[in-house]
Image (tube, grey):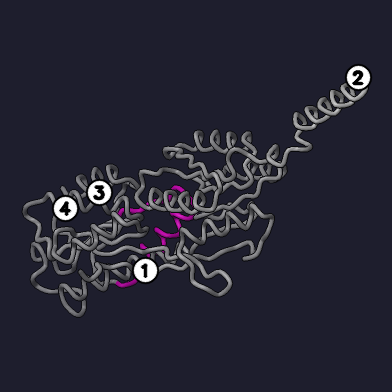
């Protein structure tokens, strides 16, 4: 009888221990290890990156959940709050508005959550992963300059320009809604303006999405149908411009070029098609990833590596990770 009571007491103690999470090795394990908060996964670059990073996490036995904010700042804040309630170990945030996330990041950190900020400097983070946005804009402009010079003449001008223009006309579709977009757009504008061998028209209306850029291009084209090139803030916008220009029957597709920033496999396919003039999107700036421990690492792998490092409570690679970028042109078939 005594033995039966002792066993019963042990069972009660064990049950209480499990209920309190003291004896179960899985009790403190969150259902979701990593929360990945991004502006919009319909963006080809973000859609590709989030998919690839999630594959790496799953292959490593970690649960990663992607939160698509649909470009809504309010929705992104709500999604980050949800990740905090889930008690994720790591938050990877690509902020829509880098000026309004400081307080919520600090609250997450006080809760013990490690925060990786990607794509912009929010000043508050455990690790930041970013590139030189101004230089990205400069290099977008460089691609346009190189192509115009090669296509028309050594100095970028020739009598055969559309409608007898004395200088090639270049249209710019920028974005200035964040610090990073301002920096990239400024680099783009400064470089093409300093070249001085083109007539530059900056769209009064900005665009980031494919649909938005198509609409902007339609309006621009009414007064600028002699343009020979368009430079856009991002590849999503370039896809919209490409769609519009390819639908214009009077445009010589072999003598029209679109250049931008950001990369994804669908973007590369469109750029590849430009080799046969089945597209006019001819080049983009691709983030190829940073150097970690002195070794080049693809962006998707580097992103997960930093996430995992933070999950393990480490800062192996430092607090600021600089992404390398390169010019992506049509690949040889």
Frontmost of labels 3 and 2 is 2
Residue 170 visible in the shown view: no
- Magenta segment: 173-195
Return the disc, 2 or 1, that comes first in the chain's sequence.
2
Q: CA distance from mark 2 to mark 4?
A: 89 Å
Return the disc, 3 or 2, that comes first in the chain's sequence.
2
Give the class, few, some or many, for how many residues have Cα within 10 Å of label 1's Cα (few <14, many ≥20).
many
Q: CA distance from mark 1 to mark 4?
A: 23 Å
Frontmost of labels 2 and 4 is 2
Mark 2 element type:
loop
Q: Which residue is mark 4?
A: 245
Give the class, few, some or many, for how many residues have Cα within 10 Å of label 4's Cα (few <14, many ≥20).
many
Q: Are marks 2 and 4 in contact (CB under 8 Å)?
A: no
Residue pictured at 18% horizontal, 49% vertical: 244
Q: Which mark is residue 1?
A: 2
Give the class, few, some or many, for how many residues have Cα within 10 Å of label 2's Cα (few <14, many ≥20).
few
Residue 141 x, y percent position in the rendering: 32, 66
Return the disc, 4 or 3, that comes first in the chain's sequence.
3
Q: Residue furthest right?
A: 2
Q: Which mark is residue 139?
A: 1
Q: Which residue is mark 3?
A: 240
Q: CA distance from mark 3 to mark 2?
A: 81 Å
Q: Is residue 101 left or right of residue 72?
A: right
Which secondary structure dominates the residues rendered in magenta? helix
Residue 237 x, y percent position in the rendering: 30, 50
Q: Residue furthest top?
A: 1
User: Would residue 194 be counted in the magenta stretch?
Assistant: yes
């Amino acid at each position: 009888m005594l033995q039966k009571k002792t066993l019963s007491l042990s069972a009660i103690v064990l049950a209480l221990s499990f209920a309190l999470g003291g004896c179960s090795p899985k009790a403190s394990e969150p259902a979701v290890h990593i929360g990945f908060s991004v502006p919009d996964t319909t963006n080809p670059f973000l859609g590709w990156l989030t998919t690839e990073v999630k594959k790496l996490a799953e292959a490593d036995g970690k649960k990663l959940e992607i939160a698509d904010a649909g470009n809504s700042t309010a929705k992104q804040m709500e999604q980050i709050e949800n990740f905090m309630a889930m008690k994720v170990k790591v938050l990877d945030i690509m902020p829509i508005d880098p000026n309004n996330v400081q307080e919520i990041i600090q609250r997450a950190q006080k809760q013990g959550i490690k925060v990786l900020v990607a794509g912009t400097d929010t000043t508050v983070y455990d690790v930041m992963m970013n590139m030189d946005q101004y230089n990205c804009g400069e290099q977008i402009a460089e691609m346009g300059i190189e192509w115009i010079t090669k296509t028309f003449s050594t100095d970028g001008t020739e009598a055969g320009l559309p409608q007898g223009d004395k200088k090639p006309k270049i249209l710019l579709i920028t974005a200035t809604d964040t610090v990073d977009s301002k920096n990239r757009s400024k680099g783009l504008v400064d470089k093409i303006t300093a070249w001085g061998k083109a007539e530059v028209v900056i769209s009064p209306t900005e665009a980031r999405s494919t649909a938005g850029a198509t609409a902007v291009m339609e309006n621009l084209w009414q007064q600028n149908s002699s343009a020979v090139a368009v430079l856009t803030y991002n590849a999503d916008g370039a896809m919209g411009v490409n769609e519009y220009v390819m639908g214009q029957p009077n445009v010589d597709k072999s003598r029209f070029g679109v250049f931008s920033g950001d990369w994804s496999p669908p973007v590369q396919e469109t750029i590849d098609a430009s080799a046969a003039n089945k597209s006019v999107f001819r080049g983009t700036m691709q983030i190829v990833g940073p150097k970690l421990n002195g070794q080049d690492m693809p962006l998707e792998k580097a992103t997960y590596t930093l996430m995992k490092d933070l999950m393990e409570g480490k800062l192996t690679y430092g607090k600021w990770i600089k992404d390398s970028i390169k010019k992506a042109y049509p690949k040889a078939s």
